[in-house]
Image (cartoon, coloured by chain):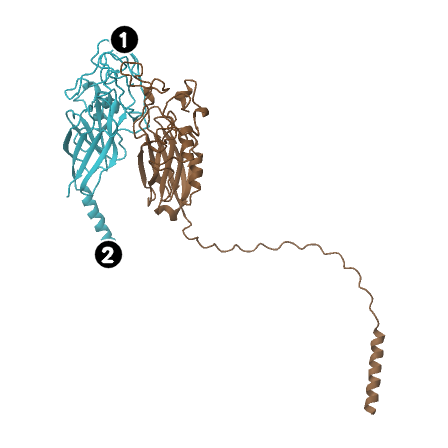
Chain colours: A cyan, B brown
Amino acid sequence: MKLTKLASATLLSLATISVTQAVTLDIEVTNLTQAQSFTPRLVVAHDNTVDTFEVGESASSALAWLAEGGVIDDEQSAESSGENFEALLGPADTDNGSNTWHKVDGLLAPKSSNSFQFDALDKPYLSLVSMLIPTNDAFVGMDSIAIPTEPGTYTYYLNAYDAGTELNDELNSARTDIVEAETGNALGGYGVPGVAGGGAPTRVVDLGMGGTGVAAQVVNGEVEDGEDGPVHIHRNALGDTDLEGGASDLDSTVHRWLNPVAKVVVTVPAS
Amino acid sequence: MNNSIIKLSTLLLMSALITACGDDGDRGPQGPAGEQGEAGVDGQDGQDGQDGINGNSAVYTVQITNLTHGQPLAPAAVILHESGFQSFVDNEPASMGIEVMAEGGDPSMVIEEAMASTDFLDAVNSGAVLPPKSVGDIQTLVVPELDADDLKLTVTTMLVNTNDGFTGLNAADVSNMTVGETKTFMTVTWDAGTEKNTETLSTIPGPAAANAGGGGASAGYDPVRDDLADVVRLHSGVVTSANSDDASKEGLAMSVLSEAHRFDNPTSRIVITRTR
């Protein structure tokens, strides 16, 4: 009896040791779209108390900042302080108990890939979110996949979601002939109407300027900043083929996509 | 000789004795029955029966989330069955049950068709429309534990703002799930191939058409099969009337749908959990 207990205790401690051996993941993200760029990528390893997004549930303010403006932390936008993912999760690149997260800087252009190393600190789940630009509030999301423990290469295909925190008016934020209804604010990223990121250096074409609005219409030079949540699968950009008119400032022959929009390859090294 | 005489006399005597007995007469009628006695003490409980062979049940819950922006999902047929049965097959004509479900939303004939199969185990009609962007009620299904090693999940539910579009699962494998285990499926969208995708108010049963004065049951099931091909295949999406009156003419002017009814796959998330 004693021998059995001793044996199982030894086995348990061995198991614990093998689990706590930190494994650094190699993660490659590929943008599969033809004309949508990815804003800086938020990569989070976490336990089951953390959820970056959940279909059928309303977006957090942190997700709204990411999906409308591509903002993850204070460094990107001081205005977002206290409401962004940094506020929700804690400091970057450290063990926050429930999670550890990393920001991959820079834009990921259409049809391109980017690899990085990420120490998941033995958290069980992996999530990844990044805004699609130019859109109102579309984001690509990986929702809490169980991090594989066996060494190997694992491939995941990700879908585009609509955060639901802004109506998909598809109006160019560079336009000065339109303002937000009631506030008079200029179009732009978080909290105001308009497509963000139209002028990104990774853009494929310039946006139009004369659209009358898709899911929200321009009325007397104003457009409302409504919501269409909770989080759901994005119904795709509409666009049109008229740069000076039509409903949208996006180009229907350029800016549309179909799921999946990203491929993620996670490599778990042999320890 | 003397002996004979004695014998003879004895015989005579005996016969005289017999004669002296005579008849007893008829018996009287039987008296009335006595009162019933008190009930006896109850007997002891019998011993428990033996366990049946493989008589235990495996219990599963199924929950559907509508991932679309503007497509309510009609009541869903949720079916557990063994391998071998399929409610529909890609690139083959739809059954009448699939046609009725995909054009009008009623899944009951899909369930009836499944029940007719020897591979059928259990089914639930969710009985309620699932609005866009929302999580549905939990459905519970029970199958013999014996069958948990060869188990398939079929789900069908109409996208009601389409002619004959539906989503769900086509005999997805859920074999050998352990108690507490969960499987998540992100589902594609099929075109039943039984109705042309005209997107008009008289052929779409959902609220998009109803709000325009059409829709309803009369815009649902129609026995005529007039699609490009009478086979089930993946749906190509709705065209809608967006951009129909601008220079691009990308839209479908007769469509009662707007850009808000467009969808991309996946259109639903289906989570199955074995709870027992």
Circle 1 sits on which residue? Answer: A221
Say which of B31 and B206 sits in front.
B206
Callout 2, which amino acid?
Leu
Local secondary structure at mark 1: loop
Distance between mark 2 and mark 1 Cα atoms: 82 Å
Most extreme residue toward the top, as rendered? Answer: A220
Position of residue A162 measured from the top left corner of the image (x, y, whole percent): 28, 24
Q: Chain of mark 1?
A: A
Task: Tell us which disc is closer to us: 2 or 1.
Answer: 1
Task: Say if B112 sits above or below B245 in the image.
Answer: below
Local secondary structure at mark 2: helix
Is residue B180 rendered to the left or right of residue B112?
left
Say which of B35 and A210 sits in front.
A210
Location of residue B242 (image quadrant)? top left
Q: Residues within 10 Å of mark 1 (few under 14, many from 20)?
A: some
Residue A120 appears in view:
no
Circle 2 sits on which residue? Answer: A3
Task: Say if A11 sits above or below A157 in the image.
Answer: below
Say which of A121 and B112 sits in front.
B112
Position of residue B33 measured from the top left corner of the image (x, y, whole percent): 73, 56
Callout 1, which amino acid?
Gly
> N-terminal of the two: label 2 or label 1?
2
Q: Quarter of the image containing the C terminus of chain A?
A: top left
Q: Quarter of the image containing the N terminus of chain A?
A: bottom left
Residue B229 appears in view:
yes
Say which of B111 and A142 sits in front.
B111
Q: Chain of mark 2?
A: A
Position of residue B269 measured from the top left corner of the image (x, y, whole percent): 32, 32
